[in-house]
Image (cartoon, grey):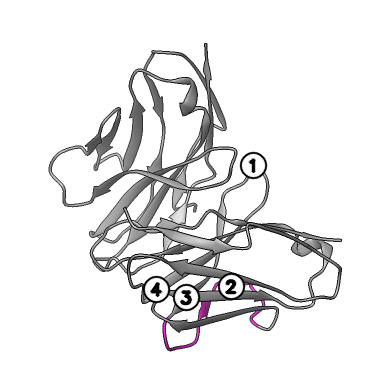
Amino acid sequence: AQKITQTQPGMFVQEKEAVTLDCTYDTSDPSYGLFWYKQPSSGEMIFLIYQGSYDQQNATEGRYSLNFQKARKSANLVISASQLGDSAMYFCAMREGPSNAGKSTFGDGTTLTVKP
Amino acid sequence: GAVVSQHPSWVICKSGTSVKIECRSLDFQATTMFWYRQFPKQSLMLMATSNEGSKATYEQGVEKDKFLINHASLTLSTLTVTSAHPEDSSFYICSALPSSYNEQFFGPGTRLTVL
């Protein structure tokens, strides 16, 4: 079974609207970290937001927030007030184990297009 | 945030030649670096975990003798694609894990084209 599942290959959103990118994960490890990265057409991977499995509150970073539903094993990314520059590929990733030296598993990604 | 550089940013080589890609952590020390490969519109595929001062740990299906990884210092890891063939053409990305951060920081990537 895939460890990280992103079910939306492509998403469209109108500028200034909010959009939710889905991510579900599968792990039996009680300690894990969840990440979202943005990859524009230039190819660089840009870290957006992190959620630890023991964090009580949902992570937020500016216009990005992570809707963490532990029982459902979902970690959806919410982008508020979309901008044209948000058009990119978005990857959800998970690192298992308590150590932050572990490797991460990435989902297949979602291509987001923001319409003017 | 921490900065990771990669060199070269793109390279074109002839089939049969070897290509070396460097990954440097510029403002922190990284005992662990990761090498990924990415095909267009696809996800990142982890190739290997590079550990300073020891042998790299390769993922299943990745040829150790073809993709040589050296992590000789706390700020530098290199990936050498030996005897490159057209099917090795891809986008190669490295990342480094500072000890004080939760997230890994990525280099800008290297686009390899083998003719």
Which badge, 4 or 3, is on the more N-terminal residue?
Answer: 4
Q: Residues within 10 Å of mark 2 (few under 14, many from 20)?
A: few
- Between the C-alphas of marks 1 and 2, the distance is 22 Å
Closer to the chain start, of discs 2 and 3, is: 2
Residue B32, label in figure: 4
Magenta stretch encompasses residue B60:
yes
Please provide the residue range marked out in magenta: B52-64
Q: CA distance from mark 3 to mark 1?
A: 28 Å
What's the amino acid at mark 3?
A: Leu
Residues tagged by mark 1 and mark 2 found on one chain of the structure = yes
* Left or right of B37 on screen, residue B94: left
- Measured in 3D between alpha carbons, the distance from the residue under mark 4 to the one under mark 3, in whole angstroms, is 10 Å
Crowding around mark 4 (Cα neighbors within 10 Å: few <14, some 14 to 19, many 20+) is many
Q: The disc labelled 2 sits on which kind of residue?
A: Gln
Side of A61 relative to B25 (left or right): left
Q: Quadrant of residue A82?
A: top left
Describe the element under mark 1 as helix, strand or loop: loop
Chain letter belonging to callout 2:
B
Q: Which kind of residue does numbered mark 4 sit on?
A: Thr
> For mark 2, what is the residue?
B60
B44 over B50 or under it: above or below? above
Q: Determine which residue is flagged by label 1.
A: B41
Foreground label between 2 and 4: 4
Label located before the other in sequence (1 or 2): 1
The span from disc 2 to disc 4 (Cα, nearest Å) is: 19 Å
Relative vertical location of residue A51 with respect to residue B66 in this rendering, above or below:
above
The outermost residue toward the front is B26
N-term mark: 3 or 1: 1
User: What's the chain of the residue with tag 4?
Assistant: B
Q: Residue placed at 74% from the left, 78% from the top? A: B82
What SS does tag 2 mark?
loop
At 31% from the left and 66% from the top, the residue drawn is: B98
